[in-house]
Image (cartoon, rainbow, N blue to C red):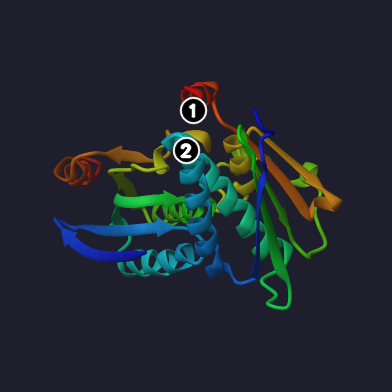
Amino acid sequence: MTVDIRKKEGVTILDIEGRIIGSDSLALKNIIDEQVAEAEEGEAKILLNLADVRMVDSSGLGIIVATYTAVQKKGGRIALLHPGGNIRSLIVMAKLVTIFDRYEDEDEAIASFHRSNN
Amino acid sequence: MGAAIEQVIHLELPSAIQHVYLLDTLIVDILNEMDFDEETTEQVILAVIEAGTNAIKHGNQEDLNKSAHFKFIIHPDKLTIIVQDEGNGFKREEVPDPLNPENLLKSSGRGIFLMESCMDSVTFEQSGTIVKMVKHKSLIEQKCESV
């Protein structure tokens, strides 16, 4: 798994590639925790780009859920971009459909962060 | 017509979580060889990764002196996977339901649920140190192969 981090209009975008299974989950958690910790209160805007992720297991899903909780506590927001592969069905199976905002267009996803500020 | 021959593949992994990748590689090859469809392949890969992670992490507590044992039994119409750890076992009925509203936002506890959701049958034996999972090929796939 590799993770590239970029900022766009105040949103931190994590471009994740590969699989989020086994020890990848802990590595991803450390990266995300760092981003959330750096964000000011109410300014944690995290967009996970999952376009190039082919497999997520329960530990990977757990990290995404933990990020949602951590970001919420900080008054921020997390959204998922291109949740393909098995992630979509995992989210449905785990009854997390209403928890995560999902987008197929990056600009639309970024705009949603600014709308939710209004 | 000759009797269908089962093929059995054994794998033993030291209890380090990074070895789950080897499991991923092996099961992908087995499923491709068996010609499972894409959706079923994803389901079985996930179930095997979850079972392997459970054996290494929860069963063997990542103790490198312990191994996780895998047996893949390839039948013409189904795949049976048996995973055994060297831990103390657990009681399936004591594992909380991850779909219970109070557990939905927990960061762990979905592994067994996903295994049971993805496979046709999942049974636990010897105090939970052995898990046996079965996935059948769909009738459509079997018909296609018989043409």
The dot on residue B145 is 1
Report the amino acid beneath label 1: Glu
Query: Does residue B100 appear anywhere in the picture?
Result: no
Q: Residue at x 61, y 59 (%)?
A: B53
Q: From this view, report whether residue B87 is shown above or below residue B91.
A: below
| Between marks 1 and 2 in the image, the one whose residue lies nearer the viewer | 1
Q: Residue at x 33, y 43 (%)?
A: A83
Tell me where residue A67 appears, x and y as whole percent. 43, 56
Q: Residue at x 48, y 58 (%)?
A: B25
Tell me where residue A68 appears, x and y as whole percent. 42, 51
Q: Quadrant of the N terminus of chain B?
A: top right
Q: For the residue carrying disc 2, how many other residues have a C-alpha within 10 Å: few (<14), some (14-19), or many (20+)?
A: some
Given residues A44 and B24, the one toward you in this image is: B24
Report the amino acid beneath label 2: Asp
Mark 2 and mark 1 in contact (Cβ < 8 Å)? Answer: yes
Tell me where residue B21 appears, x and y as whole percent. 50, 63
Q: Residue furthest bottom?
A: B65
Number of marks in the image? 2
The dot on residue A92 is none
Tell me where residue B103 appears, x and y as whole percent. 61, 43
Task: Report which quarter residue B75 is drawn in.
Answer: top right
Residues behind callouts 1 and 2 on a single chain: yes
Q: Is residue B118 left or right of residue B94?
A: left
Query: Does residue B28 appear anywhere in the picture?
Result: yes
Q: Residue furthest front?
A: B1
Question: Which chain letter matches label 1?
Answer: B
- Secondary structure under the numbered disc 1 in the rendered image: helix
Q: Earlier in the sequence, mark 1 or mark 2?
A: 2
Question: Which chain letter matches label 2?
Answer: B
The dot on residue B35 is 2
